[in-house]
Each structure stands twice: as structure tokens, then as C-alpha cells.
Image (cartoon, grey):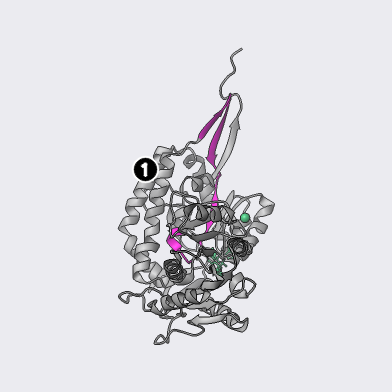
Amino acid sequence: MLEKLQFYIDGQWVDPVEPRTLDVINPATEAVYGRISLGSAADVDKAAAAARRAFASFAQTTPAERIDLLQSILAEFKKRQDDVAEAIMNEMGAPWGLARGAQAMSGVQHIKAAIKALEGFSFEERLGTTTVVREPIGVCGLITPWNWPMNQVAVKVAPDAAGVPAGVFNLVNGDGPGVGTAMSGHPDIDMVSFTGSTRAGVLIAQNAAPTVKRVAQELGGKSANILVDDETFAKAVAAGAREMFDNTGQSCNAPSRMIVPRSRMKEAATIAAKVAEETKVGKLRDEGAEMGPLVSEAQWDKVQRLIQSGIDEGATLVAGGTGRPEGLDKGYFAQPTVFADVSNGMTIAREEIFGPVLSIIPYDDLDDAITIANDTPYGLSGFVSCADLDTAREIASRLRTGMVHINGAHLDSAAPFGGYKQSGNGREWGHHGIEEFLEMKSVYGYEQRKH
Ligand code: NAI
Ligand code: MG
């Protein structure tokens, strides 16, 4: 069993102020895989003080020094990439191929993207005799969730055993009430960057308000996938369903609402159901296992409740359903599930399910499709499939979302990631992600006027 009871504060591993442990359950076996400590406000105080001390000199380092440091972090990370993948597989149930090829790999990708963005980043802007300087915002509290663990750590911070000065990076494990609240309300933390549920994101912003912290939020989503009635249709249904089941549906930007022409609902249902039935749900080390379990019993219960609500509210269940897949009687495995004839008012179309559940919704014309797509409190991502690029771009321009994928285009680690509306505030990734952590200072008279 992996036991990691200490926190990393001020350049050393230290015991928590008050002992309190949490068993980490492997969701594929339901057995205890590891044990960590849950911290308290006292640990956050120590970490914030260490960070404040480190800030004075670290804030003065040059971009070139930061780039060198990121290069050594990258080298160190690559050596341990398989250890990271192994931990992710066991703690959140990603099958080995996904854990290694996508989950752990995202650390490498984002550190590389941060280096590239920093190389081209301009920290000074001239406006006549004034210079606007960008400076680090200060001590940051970074709160990350479990669904893409390395991805979210890497986009918020990229340190390791690579010569990072003491106090620059501090790690305190904990839960929302114990550590999260202490961070968001802390008088000596300048900014909180959070990824997780909209529920927790709202609590963090409320708790951060009295200290006027900057709060960056990367929250939930209910992203629409608009399919146009043309030759791209059949392929796009299959690709959209596959993408929905990726990471067991536990991605904030999952294409969970597939919006199709009313006349092609049956066809979409048949294709998506076939993808669901062919998706290999299995043990994490199984050769070819595509879908692992949900992360926890609580998430399994939530997904079951929402699948049941789809049935109760009259959507047509065409694949999957409640309960475990056949042959798997242990682990928090759910069935890849497809609902057809969903209306956008149903609970399965409104709530972020965070499980392998696809809802297919009919539309009458493109205006109707766009209205349905935008009829949600969320605004994280959107997907469009359409052979005519001008039409695809027009649909993209009318979606109230922070990102849109045209015809299956992939995410771009140089481009900003984040959402409109209740999907959050601020952007991560690439040079926009660097800007998120900077303050601006106007220095008037930086150039002296000639008399
Ligand atoms: P959660 O939002 O409660 O937890 C995510 C992180 O926030 C954890 O690190 C947790 O310790 C922390 N946290 C919770 N309450 C906090 C508070 N008051 N102050 C500061 N930090 C706090 O989400 P949970 O319970 O893990 O999952 C529930 C649902 O949230 C999922 O079903 C999904 O819909 C959504 N979610 C969305 C994610 C995303 O990437 N946008 C990631 C994880 C969950
Ligand atoms: Mg917003």
C-alpha cells in the first residue's frame, strides 16, 4: 500500500499539524490503495507563510531563469511519468493506456507549452511615456480535482524535485471544509485558482470576497455537439459517442448533449448505441480496456440516480442503463449509456452527470439547434460537425462557450482553456494561462518627456 502521510512545505516533507488520515480507494477493486493525510487551516498557514517568504526573491527571477527551471522540472517529470501514470490508474480508475498516454502525458504537454509560451511572452508594454509592466500576483492557492489530476496540477503549477527554491511550491492535501476554505479565506493568499464543481467554485468565490482575492474558476459543463444534416453525420455520431465515454465521462468538457436533426434521430440512436455496446469496459490492466470505473462510490450513486431520472422522465434508453456492466461485480463500473429523444428540459440534459451518459436531443433547424445548445447555465465547450466550413464557423460564433471544436479538431495546449457563464472565470493553458497569474503595473514617466 502506498502511504504518503506528509505534506511538502518550505522545501521539505513535514508531518501535518494534526494527524487525520484518508484511505484512498482503488475504484476498480474497492480495496484501499493508499493512505494520505487530510490537512487543516494550521497547515495552510505554514504553507502560505513559506510561500510569502519565497515570493520576495522568486518574484525577481527572470523569464530565462524560469525557463531553465521549467526545463529541469520537465526532465525530472519525464523520469517519473510511469509512476505518475500508475498512481493515477490506481487512485481514479483510468485504464493503463489512458493513464499513461493521456493523463500522465498531459503533464509533459503542459510544461512544454508553458516553456514555449514564456519564451514568447512580453512582460512590458510601452504607451507613450508610460510603461505597463506585468508582475507575478503573489501567493497562489491552487485547488485541483481528481478527474484529470496531472493535467490540472500542470496547468496551475509545474514544480518538482528539480531545484525549485524552498517555499515556491508547497503541497497540503485535504478536503474542501478542512483545507479549501482555509485557502480561499486566507488573508495572505493573493489568488485562488480552482478546478472542480460549480457548487464548490461559488463557495470559494464567496469565501474569497472579503480578502478581495482574484479567483479563477474552471467549473462544470454540459457541452453541446451540433451535428448538421450532411455527409459528416454518421462519422460524427460515432466520434461524439466515443468522446463522451472517454475517461468514463469524467471530463468537464465532455460532449454530453448531442444535438441532431429530428429526421435523423433514429439513425443517431442506432450508431451511438452500437458504440456504447462495443466500448470495452474492464479491469485497468486489461489489454484494450477502454473504459474504467467511475472514481468513487459517491459518483457511482450520482450517475445511477441521473440515469434513473432519464428513464423516469421519458427519454428513450437505447444502450446501457442502471447497474454494473455484465461480468463486473466489483468496482464502481457503470454502463456506457445512450438516451435518445431527450428534451433539453430533462434533468439528464441540464445536470452535469460526470459519467458515461450521452443524451441525444432533436432540433428542427440550425437556429433551433443553437438555441438548444445555448440553453444551459454552462458555457464551457461546444462541438460542431458540418462539411461546409463557413456554416461551421458561423455556428461556432453563435455558441456562448469558451471553446468550440470544428469537425473533431483536438484541444490545443497553446490556446486558452476555460468557459463562459457558470463554467467559470479566467483561462488556463498557454500564454493566456500565464496572464491569469499576473498583475499589471502602470509606471508613468518611465520614459522622461523632453522639454
Ligand atoms: P468538488 O468540486 O466538491 O471537488 C473538487 C475539488 O474541490 C476537490 O479538491 C475538493 O477538495 C475541493 N473543494 C470542495 N469544496 C470546496 C470548498 N468549499 N472550498 C475549496 N475547495 C473545495 O467535486 P466532487 O465532489 O469531486 O465531484 C462532484 C461533481 O463536481 C462531479 O460530479 C462533477 O460534476 C463536478 N466536477 C467537475 C470537475 C471539472 O473538471 N470541472 C472536476 C471534478 C468534479
Ligand atoms: Mg463566467
Q: Which residue is situated farthest in the right direction here? A: 210
The x and y percentages for residue 374 are 61, 61
Disc 1 marks a residue whose amino acid type is Asp
Residue at x 48% of width, y 70% of height: 249
Q: Residues within 10 Å of mark 1 (few under 14, many from 20)?
A: few
Say whether residue 354 is left or right of residue 200. left
- In the rendered image, residue 137 lying in the magenta stretch gets the answer yes
Q: Ligand 1, what quadrant?
A: bottom right
Task: Tell me if residue 422 comes above or below residue 129 in the rendering.
Answer: below
The x and y percentages for residue 195 are 54, 60
Q: Which residues are magenta?
A: 124-151
Q: How many marks?
A: 1
Which quarter of the rendered picture does the C terminus lie within? top right
Say whether residue 72 is left or right of residue 264. left
Residue at x 50% of width, y 81% of height: 318
Task: Tell me if residue 196 comes above or below residue 263 in the rendering.
Answer: above
The residue that label 1 is drawn on is 68
Decide if residue 266 is in sight here. Answer: yes
Task: Tell me if residue 276 comes above or below residue 250 in the rendering.
Answer: below
Q: Quadrant of residue 4?
A: bottom left
Nearest the camera: 118 or 13?
118
The x and y percentages for residue 369 are 59, 64
Ligand 1 closer than 8 Å to label 1 CB = no
Which quarter of the rendered picture does the N terminus lie within? bottom left
Residue at x 60% of width, y 24% of height: 445
- In the rendered image, residue 179 lying in the magenta stretch gets the answer no
The x and y percentages for residue 196 are 55, 63
Q: Secondary structure at mark 1?
A: helix
Nearest the camera: 244 or 251?
244
Decide if residue 293 is in sight here. Answer: no
